[in-house]
Image (tube, rainbow, N blue to C red):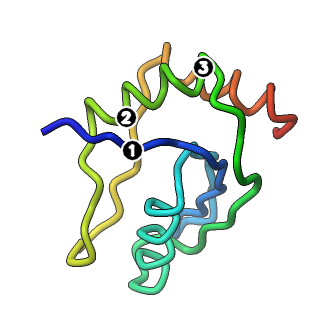
Amino acid sequence: MKNHEVLDLIQEITRNDGTSYMEIGNMLMNGRAELAAERGFIKQVRILQLNIPHSTHVAKYEQYINETFTIPDETMDHWEEWTKTPDMQAEVDLILKENHIG
């Protein structure tokens, strides 16, 4: 089943080993990340920017996420980091750049 999530925020997710990464998400995924932190699957999550413009880069990444991953429900038992192809990592880097982050 294809998701129809609209990605509209940038968050920083800190793994349990202390390393962190930037992710493009939405309030639903941010809530899931908060739950993952409460359950000890990740160390923390913080929103860096809300309501990012829906650029062509966001649209491409959004399509990739919606076609590739399933949004976890509240019963999740681990945190699934969204792996990115080199092309999708380039899109994320461009999103961060156009939003003056990183």
* Residue drawn at the location 50% of the way across and 75% of the way down: 34
Dot 3 alpha-carbon crowd within 10 angstroms: few under 14, some 14 to 19, many 20 or more: some
Look at the numbered discs 2 and 1 and tell me whether their residues touch, using CB distance below 8 Å: yes
Mark carried by residue 57? 3
The answer to which image quadrant residue 82 occupies is top left
Determine which residue is flagged by label 2. 65
In the image, residue 80 sits, relative to residue 66, either above or below, namely: below
Total marks shown come to 3
Q: Amino acid at mark 1?
A: Glu
Q: Earlier in the sequence, mark 3 or mark 2?
A: 3
Residue 78 placement (x, y as % from top left):
29, 68
Residue sitting nearer the eye, 36 or 26: 26
Determine which residue is flagged by label 1. 5
| Spatial CA span between label 3 and label 1 | 15 Å
Dot 2 alpha-carbon crowd within 10 angstroms: few under 14, some 14 to 19, many 20 or more: many
Mark carried by residue 70? none
Instruction: Say whether residue 98 is left or right of residue 59.
Output: right
